[in-house]
């Protein structure tokens, strides 16, 4: 019987058969932990040298094992498993040959691999096997070989219309009786071989994909020297792939970005090979662009870091969007209008400071998570009823309702709530936004006005009625609120001179007011004064005479508006326009801005150079299209396309691309640069205010000639 030894295959000699060898084996079986030579000789009453000789024979034959323990050698029975017990369980095909070429043992797996019958080939010579098997295997070579080492080969076995791949191990074998032979172990590696071939094809496709990727892909060593870059990277930085090793990734980074990248490289290890950074790159064409980089450290087989691979994705638009969202978030948080975001389930997810002040809360965490119904009485419609009964919310039209609630301190409050939907890009609702207006005072005023039952009771404007004798007959609450410096708001039955005496700017204009009323019947003017708190107060005052059917003066109506906030907004808007014009002036590319009604509001120096038209000659005019087309008819004017429908845009301007809310176009202007021609890239985008309303458009024009010619140069080199 043949055996496979658990530790390794051993060469052997013919083991001497005899009673003494059996006695040694039997003794070692009794002591499985082993015995020394002296212990064996004592127990068997035998010469120590003879025991050592027989132990050496048994050790060579593989029957016993020896372990060195200090100066002593301990022998124990080898742990062997008969090969016959493994043949049926192993996934490899196994065939055992004797030294004369007879098939001693063969398992079912081997027979299935090569379409053999175990019963018909056992005991036969291997030369009786089929010609295909004999050509594939080198039985004779390894049986007759004097080498005792293990040999491995990969062979291809073809039969009929199929081919399979096998990994074959030829192992010199010693049987229990001391005879030698050959064990052939066959493993079917067809699947692995095919997978390797597919992997090679996949790698080839991967290389093609990498080159076609719009993302930037590069590899660089520990010093930042670029060792590989895909086409997108080379195009962005206007480099030839053969020039990579002369450039460092740090050439294109700002100092802060370079520090981030080095810090990430130093923090990498085989257990944490990936780090992500976001920074701005400096392309040769100019301008900074944000990229999100995923970097992975690449190690050798010993775990030593050899280089890094980075994949960069352009997030410039996302960064600008985040900045815009930050500005809008700040505007929302600082808004004087109480605002709350409500989940689709009806729970508060965000409120601004004005909301907290309105309802008497100090900490936003006391409000987040509260149901919308918490801010209204129980007998009023629930949030789900408000949403379900008002399809205008789903249609983005919004819905306005009145609620009556209790502040945190228990005081009642009346509020008007306007609820609108917030939708994602797929037009699916994300949440709802609610605007709260405190109308508690307004409700009280309405009740008073309802009692008086006058036509002007519901007016938000400050209104008053003056008799022909210049006595104030009635002043509504808004009028009293605006003219708050009058003691107790006691206008009724007092002369207009007395009421306006608290406002020097107005009282001084009374003669002019009377003259205008007598001449034209009306008078309008904006007055600036100081309110009772010392703050600036801007009022728009309008007076008009009312005549009866006979043409006699019936009364004089006064309406007044507090436009302090409006003036502040106008001043802020003017400041914003000035800042925007200043920003445009800093842009190196030709850039201009038009308002919503197509009036030029900004025209930078680069635009003056491009068109030859000075800023002061075009600001405030509508002539930008005429000017640009006079310079070059092929120069695109994209700001005029925003009112076109998508269908008209595609039909009339097929060369214009739209990405998001912006238009892009390329053009070649033949008469620029002394007739050499110029490639330009134009972009136009809308300018929106904090409410999302379009207030103007901006277009910039970038000279892409160098970039285009660099690309053409690279293409010509590749083709050549």
Image (tube, rainbow, N blue to C red):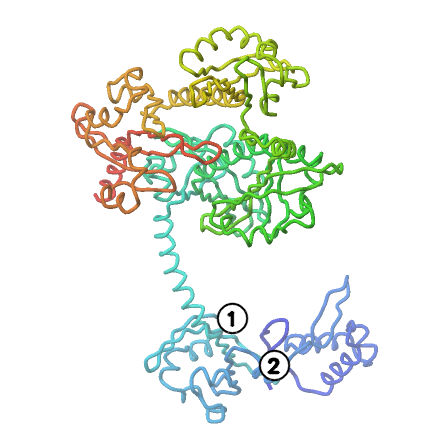
Residue 428 to residue 497: above or below: below
Left or right: 599 as drawn, with respect to 361: left
Residue 556 to residue 119: above or below: above
* Front-lying residue, 643 or 657: 643
**Circle 1 sits in a helix, a strand or a loop, which is it?**
loop
* Front-lying residue, 254 or 21: 254
Q: Residue 413, position in %: x, y?
A: 68, 37
**Of pointers 1 and 2, the one earlier in the residue sequence:** 2
Left or right: 602 as drawn, with respect to 27: left
Q: Residue 182 bears which disc, if any? A: none
- Residue found 59% across the figure and 25% down from its top: 476
Q: Residue 609, position in %: x, y?
A: 27, 19
Q: Can residue 517 be seen at all in this image of the molecule?
A: yes
Q: Quadrant of the C terminus?
A: top left
- Residue found 60% across the figure and 53% down from its top: 384
Q: Which residue is mark 1?
A: 150
Q: Residue 126, position in %: x, y?
A: 44, 86
**Circle 2 sits in a helix, a strand or a loop, which is it?**
strand
- Residue found 45% across the figure and 8% down from its top: 515
Q: Which residue is mark 2?
A: 3
Q: Quadrant of residue 401?
A: top right
């Amino acid at each position: 019987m043949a055996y496979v030894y658990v530790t390794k295959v051993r060469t052997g000699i013919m083991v001497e058969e005899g009673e003494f060898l059996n006695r040694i084996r039997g003794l070692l079986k009794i002591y499985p932990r082993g015995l020394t030579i002296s212990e064996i000789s004592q127990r068997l009453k035998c010469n120590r040298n003879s025991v050592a000789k027989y132990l050496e024979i048994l050790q060579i034959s593989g029957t016993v094992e020896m372990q060195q323990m200090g100066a002593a050698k301990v022998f124990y029975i080898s742990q062997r498993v008969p090969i016959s017990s493994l043949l049926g369980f192993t996934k490899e095909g196994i065939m055992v040959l004797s030294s004369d070429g007879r098939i001693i043992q063969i398992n079912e797996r081997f027979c299935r691999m090569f379409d053999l019958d175990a019963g018909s080939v056992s005991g036969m010579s291997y030369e009786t096997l089929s010609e295909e098997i004999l050509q594939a295997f080198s039985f004779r070579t390894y049986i007759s070989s004097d080498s005792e080492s293990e040999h491995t080969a990969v062979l291809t076995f073809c039969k009929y219309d199929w081919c399979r791949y096998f990994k074959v191990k030829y192992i010199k074998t010693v049987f229990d009786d001391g005879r030698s032979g050959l064990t052939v172990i066959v493993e079917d590696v067809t699947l692995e071989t095919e997978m390797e071939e597919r992997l090679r094809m996949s790698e080839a496709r991967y290389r093609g994909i990498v080159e076609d990727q719009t993302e930037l892909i590069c590899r660089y060593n520990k010093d930042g020297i670029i060792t590989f870059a895909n086409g997108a990277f080379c195009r962005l930085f206007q480099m030839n792939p053969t020039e990579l090793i002369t450039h460092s990734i740090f050439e294109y980074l700002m100092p802060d970005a370079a520090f981030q990248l080095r810090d990430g490289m130093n923090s990498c290890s085989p257990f944490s090979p990936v780090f992500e950074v976001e920074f701005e790159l400096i392309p040769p064409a100019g301008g900074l662009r944000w990229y999100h980089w995923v970097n992975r450290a690449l190690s050798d087989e010993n775990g030593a870091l050899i280089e890094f691979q980075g994949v960069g994705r352009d997030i410039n638009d996302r960064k600008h969007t985040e900045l815009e969202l930050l500005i809008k978030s700040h505007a929302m948080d600082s808004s004087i209008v109480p605002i709350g975001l409500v989940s689709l389930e009806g729970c508060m997810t965000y409120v601004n400071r004005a909301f907290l002040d309105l309802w008497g809360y100090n900490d936003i965490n006391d409000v987040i998570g509260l149901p919308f119904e918490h801010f209204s009485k129980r007998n009023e419609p629930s949030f789900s009823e408000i949403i379900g009964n008002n399809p205008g919310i789903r249609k983005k039209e919004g819905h306005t309702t009145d609620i009556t609630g209790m502040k945190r301190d228990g005081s009642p409050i009346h509020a008007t709530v306007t609820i609108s939907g917030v939708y994602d890009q797929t037009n699916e609702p994300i949440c709802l936004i609610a605007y709260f207006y405190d109308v508690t005072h307004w409700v009280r005023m309405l009740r008073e006005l309802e009692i008086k039952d006058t036509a002007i009771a519901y007016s938000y404007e400050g209104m008053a009625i003056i008799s022909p004798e210049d006595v104030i007959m009635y002043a509504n609450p808004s009028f009293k609120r605006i003219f708050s410096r009058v003691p107790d708001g006691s206008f009724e039955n007092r002369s207009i001179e007395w009421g306006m005496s608290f406002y020097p700017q107005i009282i001084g204009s009374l003669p002019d007011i009377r003259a205008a009323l007598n001449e034209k019947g009306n008078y309008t003017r904006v007055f600036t004064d100081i309110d009772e708190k010392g703050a600036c107060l801007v009022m728009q005052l309008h007076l008009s005479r009312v005549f009866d059917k006979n043409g006699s003066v019936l009364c004089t109506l006064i309406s007044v508006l507090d436009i302090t906030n409006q003036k502040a907004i106008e001043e802020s808007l003017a400041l914003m326009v000035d800042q925007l014009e200043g920003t445009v002036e800093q842009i190196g590319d030709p850039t201009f801005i038009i308002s919503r009604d197509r009036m030029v509001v900004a025209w930078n120096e680069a635009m003056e150079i491009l068109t030859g038209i000075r800023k002061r000659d075009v600001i405030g005019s509508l002539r930008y299209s005429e000017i640009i087309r006079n310079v070059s008819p092929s120069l695109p004017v994209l700001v005029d396309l925003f009112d076109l429908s998508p269908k008209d845009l595609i039909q009339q301007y097929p060369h214009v691309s739209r990405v998001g809310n912006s238009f892009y176009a390329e053009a070649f202007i033949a008469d620029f640069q002394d007739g050499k021609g110029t490639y330009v890239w134009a972009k136009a985008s809308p300018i929106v205010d904090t409410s999302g309303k379009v207030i103007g458009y901006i277009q910039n024009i970038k000279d892409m000639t160098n970039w285009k010619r660099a690309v053409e140069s690279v293409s010509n080199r590749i083709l050549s």
